[in-house]
Structures are given as C-alpha cells and as structure tokens.
Amino acid sequence: YNIKVTQGIFEAEKINTHEQFFQSVINECGEIAGVVIAFGYMTNTEQMHDLNNLQKIIAINFTGAASILTVCANYFETQKKGFIIGIT
C-alpha cells in the first residue's frame, strides 16, 4: 500500500502543548490521512486508592485523550476527510 507511518511522543497532561505538537506532526508529514493514538497511565493496585494518583490517571487517560483527539478531529474536519483510532 506504500503508506508512510510516523510515530511521536507527547505529554498528555500538558494540554496547552497539544496544538503545537499536532502542528509539528503536520509540518513533518504534510497532509495526513489518519491518526492512531495509543497511550495511558495506570498505577499499581495500592496506589489506586491515592487521590493524587487518581487525578493523574484522569488527567492523562481522559483529559489528555480528549484534548489531543479534539485537536486531531478539528484538523480532519477542515480537511473533510480522515480517521481517528484512539486506544487508551
């Protein structure tokens, strides 16, 4: 199929950097056909009861995912095409 695939690393908790990160992907790749996002944060069972860890889990797995996926969706909406696969 001759499809170029690129991977990158971003800080899910730093939602104020998501637009800049995605723009850097566009700059590197040019027009993109789709996005596959796979990330998440989990602690061990003992730490699950710590509210600070709970906040971190929510910040990364929910808020971070919602933020970067919104940036991606906004791009694809302007392109009138594209796909998103999110695995968290």
Image: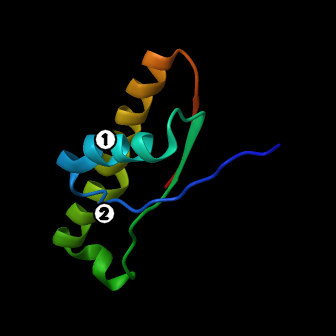
Residue type indicated by callout 1: Ser
- x, y (%) of residue 55? 21, 62
Left of 75 or right of it: where is 33?
right
Give the labeled residue for mark 2: 57
Pointer 1: what residue?
Answer: 67
Picture quarter containing residue 27? Answer: top left
Mark 2 and mark 1 lie on one chain; the one further toward the N terminus is 2
Q: Would residue 27 appear left or right of 31 to someone viewing this image?
A: left
Colouring chosen for the image of the structure: rainbow
What residue is at 26 percent from the left and 44 percent from the top?
A: 20
Q: Residue at x 36, y 77 (%)?
A: 43
Q: Quadrant of the N terminus?
A: top right
Q: Residue at x 58, y 20 (%)?
A: 81
Residue 87 seen from this side: yes
Is residue 69 shown above or below 24? above
Q: Nearer the viewer, residue 47 or 8?
A: 8
